[in-house]
Amino acid sequence: MDTVIIVGESRADRLLEKFGMLKAQEAEIIDCADAVVILGRGAKVKIRAALGVIIDGDDPPELPRAVQLISCGVSPKNTVSITSRTPEILTFSLNRSVRGKNGVCEPFELPAPAASDFSEYDQMAAFAARLLLK
């Protein structure tokens, strides 16, 4: 089963119900090369290995360079951003290639229904997690 580990404050788990989920406010060490890690607000963790670590690109934590970082934020410098928004639709943009479970995913844009009950970061993090585990 594909696994997502959420550390810190995030509601992205509610957007990823089809995946195995671990959720904690803090974690000592994560060493799981096949899992996607989403770092929410206040996350405290040391990461040794992960398929990818999804972070808030507008408030990035310090992490080792040995893991694939997927930054999510409003700037096109982030790996994942939102290029257009209406109350009903968000257009997610993958701005550079990422290495997922089954190979490389190239940049693209995808319009999707907006989930108004969730922060844009949680929606971008869920989008990025799905890409990595696809």
Image (tube, grey):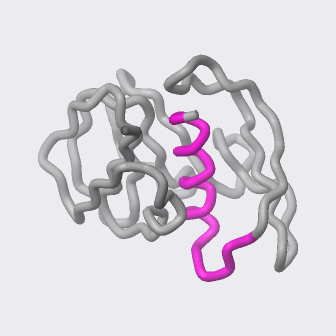
**Is 23 situated left or right of 128 in this image?**
left
**Is 109 situated left or right of 105 in this image?**
right
Residue at point 38%, 27% (across, down):
67
Tell me the quadrant of the picture where the C terminus can be found: top right
**Is 3 situated left or right of 11 in this image?**
left
Residue at point 38%, 47% (across, down):
4
Residue at point 70%, 57% (across, down):
74
Please provide percent x and percent y for residue 133.
51, 35
| Residue 118, quarter of the rendered image | bottom right
Please provide percent x and percent y for residue 12.
48, 63
Please provide percent x and percent y for residue 127.
62, 50
In this rendered view, identify the residue nearer to me: 19 or 23: 19
Look at the magenta stretch and give its main secondary structure: helix
Asked whether residue 68 is drawn in magenta, I would say no
Residue stretch rendered in magenta on the structure: 114-133
Among all residues in the image, which is located at the extreme left? 28
Q: Is residue 17 above or below residue 77?
A: below
Please provide percent x and percent y for residue 70.
54, 39
Asked whether residue 118 is drawn in magenta, I would say yes
Tell me the quadrant of the picture where the N terminus can be found: top left
